[in-house]
Image: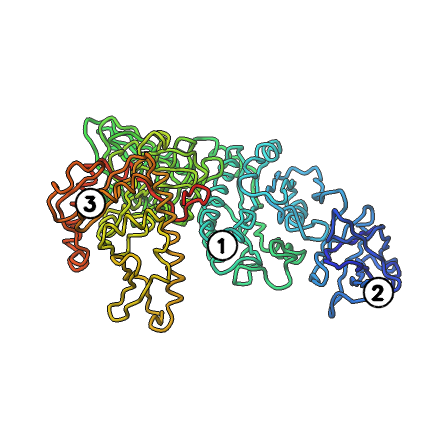
Amino acid sequence: MYRFQIIANTQMGESIGIVGSIPELGMWDVTKCVPLRTNRDRYPLWWTDREIDIQPSLDSAEPRRVEYKYVRFDANGNVRWEALGPNRWIPIDPADQSSTIVVDDGAFGYLQPYPFGYIEGSAVKMPPAQGSQGLKIVVIGSSVAFGYKAWLFKGWVWLLAQTLQEKYGHQLVNVSEAGTNVTSTIARFPSVVTPEKPDIVIIALSLGNEGLAHCPPHQRRAVQRRFESGLQQLVKMTREIVARPILGGVYPNNDYWPEHYWLLKETHNRLLNWGVPVLDWLAAVDNGQGRWKDGISSDPAHPNTIGHRLMYEAINLDLFDIDKGELAQEKQRFQKPNQVFVYADKAGFQISANIEEKRLRISNSSPNSYTIAPYWQELQTTLQTQAGLIPGIYLAKYAQQGTLPFFAVQENGAIATTMEIPSGADLEYSAAFNLFAPNNSQLFFYDGHLGILQADKHHLWVINESDHEYNVHPMWKEVRSALKAMPEGVYEDPLHPDIPFRTMMIGKQGLESRVKIPAKSAVLFQYKCQLSDISRVAIIPLGDRCAVRMMLYKMEYDGPAFPFDLTRTTNIADIADIIENGFYDMWNPSYLHYNSYIGRIYHSKWTGLSFAHEVEDTDNAAYDMSPVFERMRQRYTARSERFWYTVKNCDKALFVRTGLADRGGVIDLVSKLEKQCQGKPFHLLLLSPQPSDQFLDIPNVLHHDVEFNPDRMYDDLAHWMYCTEVMREILESLGVSSKNLFWCPPNPPKELETK
């Protein structure tokens, strides 16, 4: 008995039928076709309302082939065949007559090279064991391992089970589940694999189910790392139940593009070097671009019956020609700790490794300290040949003051980091790779070099595997957003709390501070307090030129631009008036005039205001300023929004103004700033070459008799750096540092704005 179903998007009044080469399907006469039905809950799926009895041929024991097509009827009864060319077909086998077979034909108009059908209400059964003394093999994987899209689910696993039973007497049990990934497979493993007491476990998962094909580009490396780490964890779990692991290799997906394919091959090559047998499928089914070869897939993620057979034929059956005595010896080896003594001297310095778990232990019972460095050639050679270290970062199990919480391993297996090992030290390091495995941590971000992972709700690892320092800041959208998942608060490096840029502030919008991670290092950030427990200071430049912005840039205190950062404002009274008016008219085209000779845009309402950085080389400003004005509207609207967001949300505002100022203008500006701050603490820091006594006794005003000329800074980098150090000293004297700096997000939340 057979039921047919297909996806068809139809219009009101249209219907679908099936017509084919046998009387039960109308003998190609559309007036005798079998109608399909649908309903509101299952549309656009259409299916035959009754089971169709198609009998095998009485003339032959071979499967009978029935051909057919779907037709679409409009409201007037006019018929349209689904496609020209080859017909759909199904095999009618005498062995398949005991149950109802559901024929799933995909989508109307898209003919498959090989049909897909399954027995209704029943999973495919593996070939029965014949009471032999062979091995027990369990396959745990996803839908491809389950047999999905192979006829009657008889995919590569079913074919393998049949062969292994016939050739070696092995029994195969398939506990695969559609849609599963490494995380869910790790969770299922104890309940579906362990009770089977297998001799061999085949782990057959895909990067597709991890989301590689459709995740944002910045998440692809994280998907890859999580997948590989998860596979390693499953290998470890297999050995813990004293079974031999075999890995199913990676395979294509028709939604992969060149970068996906590059990652696919990278994972493929790494699997082949793990020391675990791999079912190598890629060469057999890949078209050379990360997609299935023509005619062997049913949909982007799944092979059809032909593709499943190619995967089966690519399996090296010698992997299963295993002597039971050999397997028993292997099981005994894995029951013992895989501890290797790598190096020891007579004084009490000793190094051992657990290769399987990617751990290294360093102990020093001598009265002397030791230095592990690249130039200690004898030790490095021993590490390379015996320790089995993998490239990347290793993390200390219990980091302590005075000991390095990490070390880096080169591609050749040598330690690249200089490490001081004090007397009495007993240190254990584990590969950061282990941390990426599901259930070991929550992976927030990984780009192939920088990894950000939550160890628990109070600890966060930031791991830099690259050869350069990473500057992690709120303007990095993907990182900022990823850290929304972390509990809000202030996090610090407990081992080095006084190093600049080792304070991580996390708010509702994610990361709110700049953090610097040295090359080939790892930093553990520990929760310290709530954001409300510290007083965060916002530095808000008010002109007269871009000197403050330039110095903040060199100090790496710069964030998104504010309205006065890239302007010239010679009149302090203009600043007061612009702020009082909420920046209204600051970028109004009615008040803007471009001087093409000087290359500046001047403002007619606030005559001390001008712009030098708004006209770009591609603009034809002499004839059409409209693109410039539109760009200014967007830029300065955003900058003013950041200004008001910062004033409202910081704990204290430090407004900074360079250039000469008069006492009356300062008093007026302070009065208007006080109104806008609405009781929030603030200071106006004046930096100008004039006597400070001119501003004595003005509340909230601080003055330094210094000159910061941006033109001279541009011309002389040494002078720029000198000015920056002076500015840093001034800020430090006011208690402002990277540990309490308020960072405005690039795009402030609309609901929190005040203007």
Q: Nearer the viewer, residue 753 or 591?
A: 591
In front of the other: 580 or 508: 580
- Give coordinates of residue 623: x percent, y percent: 36, 73
- Residue at (87, 60) in percent of width and height: 59
Label 2 to label 1: alpha-carbon separation: 51 Å
Residue ID for mark 1: 264
Q: Nearer the viewer, mark 2 or mark 3?
A: 3
Amino acid type indicated by mark 1: Leu
**Label drawn at residue 76:** 2
Within 10 Å of disc 2 (Cα), the crowding (few <14, some 14-19, many 20+) is: few
Of pointers 2 and 1, the one earlier in the residue sequence = 2
What residue does disc 3 label? 664
Residue at mark 1 to residue at mark 3: CA–CA distance: 68 Å
Q: Are marks 1 and 3 in contact (CB under 8 Å)?
A: no
From the viewer's perspective, is 318 left or right of 670? right
Disc nearest the viewer among 1 and 3: 3
**Mark 2 or 3 closer to N-term?**
2
Q: Earlier in the sequence, mark 1 or mark 3?
A: 1
Mark 2 vs mark 3, CA separation in Å:
87 Å
